[in-house]
Amino acid sequence: MHAVMKPATRVFVPGDSSANAIGAAETAAALAQAGAKVVRTGSRGLYWLEPLVEIERDGRRIGYGPVAAEDVPALLAAMQNGTAEHSLCVGDLDRMLADQGQQRWALGRSGVVVPADWEDYVAHGGTDGLRKALGMTPQDILKAVRESGLRGRGGAGFPTGVKWQTVHEADNSPKYVVCNADEGDSGTFADRMLLEGDPLCLLEGMAIAALAVGAERGYIYLRSEYPDARRSLEMALVAARANGMLGDAILGSAQAFDIEIRVGAGAYICGEETSLLESLEGKRGEVRYKPPLPAVRGFLGKPTVMNNVITLATVPAIFVQGAPAHHALGINRSRGTLTVQLCGNIKRPGLYELPFGVTLGHVIDELGGGSASGRPVRAVQVGGPLGAYLPPERFDTPLGYEEFADVKAIIGHGGVVVFDDSVDMAAQARFAMEFCAIESCGKCTPCRVGSVRAQEVIDRITADDNREANIELLRELCETMIQGSLCAHGGMAPFPVLSALNHFPEDFEPRTAAA
Amino acid sequence: MEPMSDMSGIDDICERHARRDAPLLPILHEVQDRFGYISDAAIRRIAEALNLTRAEVFGVVSFYHDFRDRPARRRRLRVCRAEACQAVGGREVWAAAEALAAEPDSPFEVQAVYCLGNCACAPSVQLDGRTLGRFTPERVSRLAAAKVGRSCTP
């Protein structure tokens, strides 16, 4: 006979697309069939435990994972016997996150609340930040954002308060708030997790930005690869309008603000802000010359706040907890938290929202548990496909914008991809240029032509054709791309290549037949 | 999918989006969702409706990887070729998928994609719009053996 749950017991199962990609929907169906009241949430970001089931007992949530659909009968039988003991039990997840040193500013509600459910959102502190901001003047809002030390989490790390101030002061209207949800970097999924798990938080952050700069219209430019995030955002927009957070008056204030979703069409370059603006205007996603900055001349030539999802989603918490509390976290000029997205060949892949200053090695060894294959970790690419590869000798680098720049690397959007010793760094270098060529918008020559030539030169190096001279040529070509490209796509694609050459020169040596 | 012989459907889509700011991308998405691809005739019609040149519309269609100028095969397999998947066997999944598409009369259209945001559960593929994680070459082979309808996932 199958175990059947007490009908009142609530069971939380992520509806997050990554959790569903490894069976969470089937697990949820099996639980529902057994009579459980299944609640679909977003993900906590503990992906090695997905499908991660949380069962409510005496008002507390106890985690179990990974729970495949086949595991459900045995799990329920154990519950039936009145014991929470089970080999898959991982305990209280809030405690696990705290033990990992996580401080959730942006992603505190993801995996906890029902996405886009207004009452659940408000019950978990949603709108508190916005309500606080509504009692402040635009100048005071700007001051708070400046003093928090918040910098753009999309990768460039530009101070958010300064950007908003520029838009606020711009003598031109209308003004726009545009959210960059074109999360294209390999190894990153923080935006997706937030959009699927707590979409109202993004809308709240955008509303605060609108108050600060005096914008009445916002856009979310979402990549087409995220259909689940689109559905969740659409539901959030409905809930936010029905409850007055968006519309003619933000929560009864004098300011109108509404948001529209625009879906991209599969172009990595549209994550670059000026290319995104072109795309939003219905054109080819070719980058613009800067200046003028989007803050001065952005969407349709008007002053535009452009921020990444995580930047905007961090803003409400800054108003709840206060700018000084945010500024108190981190090191040097990197304040607050970084949503580290740990993946690749790693035992415990997932999202770790950590204060800046934690070392890369701590993330990989302590939190990630080392490689999944059990072989030595050899290289780590941080910051997406334009980020440098770092060897273990650099694992003592603390997470921070300037700290990473000092070792010729980037933090980017916080993606950390781990490779074990089976990696071929010449192949990775070649791929960086292949990707650069595929996704180049074609506007500037160093990027469009340089990336193709670089692949040819790397092929000659690995074929041991005039190797020394070609390595020198590759370095010169990289320098030309860095100096001469219009945007970061061509300007940073050389980073992975040069880091591979510098840290792993042996992979560019002639191969013996045996290898 | 509706056949694209009748252009009134295109006019209807253009009409509905006409008053939005910069409506071209939403229009192209809807045309493709409804008809499966964006034909030359559709480009001509959209250009007329928006008062753009055909070159401008064609330039946009051809810029973005998502838009297609001919109908797709019956089933669509997108395989992530980016670094996070490479680190855990993504290259092997891609090779198997290419072989699958190359089989005679294969119903599968295989496309490279660079990140599906499923990096923590890699390697990733998207089969008929559904993201699947921890994919393997063996699961690709099972797809080939099954040659069945849309409901089947390996």
Image: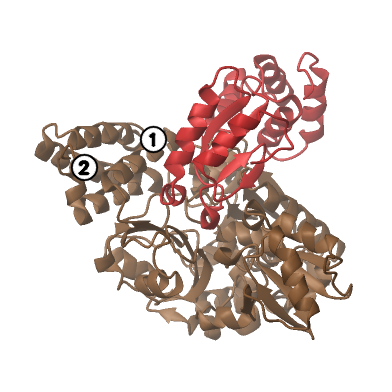
Q: Which of marks 1 and 2 is in front?
A: 2
Q: Which residue is drawn at 68% across and 21% down?
A: B47
In this view, the residue in front, B104 or A172, is B104
- Quarter of the picture containing the C terminus of chain A is top left
Mark 1 crowdedness (10 Å alpha carbons): few <14, some 14-19, many ≥20: many
Q: Residue furthest front?
A: A1
Colour of chain A in the rendered structure image = brown
Using the image, name the chain to which the residue with label 1 belongs: A
Tell me: A219 left or right of A330: right
Q: In this view, does A266 lie above or below A260?
A: above
Determine crowd level at label 2: few under 14, some 14-19, many 20+ residues with C-alpha closer than 10 A. few
Residue at 81% x, 15% y: name it.
B6
State the residue in front, B119 or A165. B119
Which residue has dot 1 on it? Answer: A437
What is the drawing colour of chain B? Answer: red
Residue A399 visible in image = no
Asked whether residue A177 is in view, the answer is yes
Considering only vertical position in the picture, is A489 above or below A323?
above
Q: Nearer the viewer, residue A94 or A181?
A: A94
Q: Identify residue type, mark 2.
A: Ala
Give percent across and percent down for residue B18. Answer: 77, 33
Under mark 1, the amino acid is: Ala
Left or right: residue A486 versus residue A499 is right
Q: Mark 2 points at which residue?
A: A515
